[in-house]
């Protein structure tokens, strides 16, 4: 399953995540169950990385999941992929 953020969600920064002084702007989320990848742009130490990938696991499976629902769920674990 591949889920995208709408233009309105992007304008309202629903696709924005901030971790460890880094900013991520997610274009789409792909996966199922509790395992997903998020693909987008990352800004880390003032460097921009396009097509940045975060692999992550959420704590509970979400029925009828949306991109917003998954990105705002509690994350159990994550890894960056350059």
Image: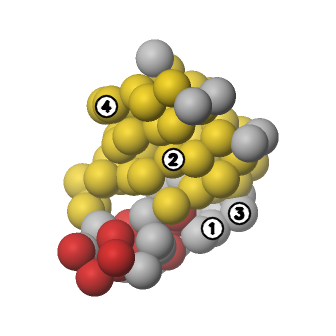
Q: Earlier in the sequence, mark 2 or mark 1?
A: 2
- Give the class, few, some or many, for how many residues have Cα within 10 Å of label 4's Cα (few <14, many ≥20): some
Of badges 2 and 1, the one in the foreground is 2
Q: Is residue 8 above or below residue 77?
A: below
Q: Which residue is mark 3?
A: 74
Q: Marks 2 and 3: in contact by CB < 8 Å?
A: no
Residue 51's mark? 4
Q: Residue placed at 46% from the left, 17% from the top?
A: 82
**Closer to the camera: disc 1 or disc 4?**
4
- Whether residue 14 can be seen here: yes
Mark 4: which secondary structure?
A: strand
Towards the viewer: 33 or 41: 41
- Residue occupied by mark 2: 24
Instruction: Give the CA separation, mark 1 to mark 4.
Output: 22 Å
Q: Secondary structure at mark 1?
A: loop
Left or right: 21 in relation to 5: right
Label total for image: 4
Residue at x 71%, y 63% (from the top left corner)? 74
Question: What is the crowding at mark 3: few (fewer than 14 residues within 10 Å), some, or many (at least 20)?
Answer: few
Mark 3 → mark 1, Cα distance in angstroms: 4 Å
Q: Determine the residue located farthest toward the top in the rendered image.
A: 82
Q: Position of residue 81 (x, y in %)?
A: 49, 21
């Amino acid at each position: 399953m591949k889920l995208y953020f709408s233009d309105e969600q992007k304008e309202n920064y629903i696709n924005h995540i901030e971790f460890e002084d880094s900013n991520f702007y997610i274009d789409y989320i792909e996966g199922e169950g509790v395992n997903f990848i998020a693909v987008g742009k990352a800004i880390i130490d003032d460097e921009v990385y396009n097509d940045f990938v975060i692999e992550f696991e959420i704590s509970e499976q979400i029925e009828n999941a949306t991109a917003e629902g998954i990105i705002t769920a509690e994350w159990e674990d994550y890894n960056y992929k350059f």
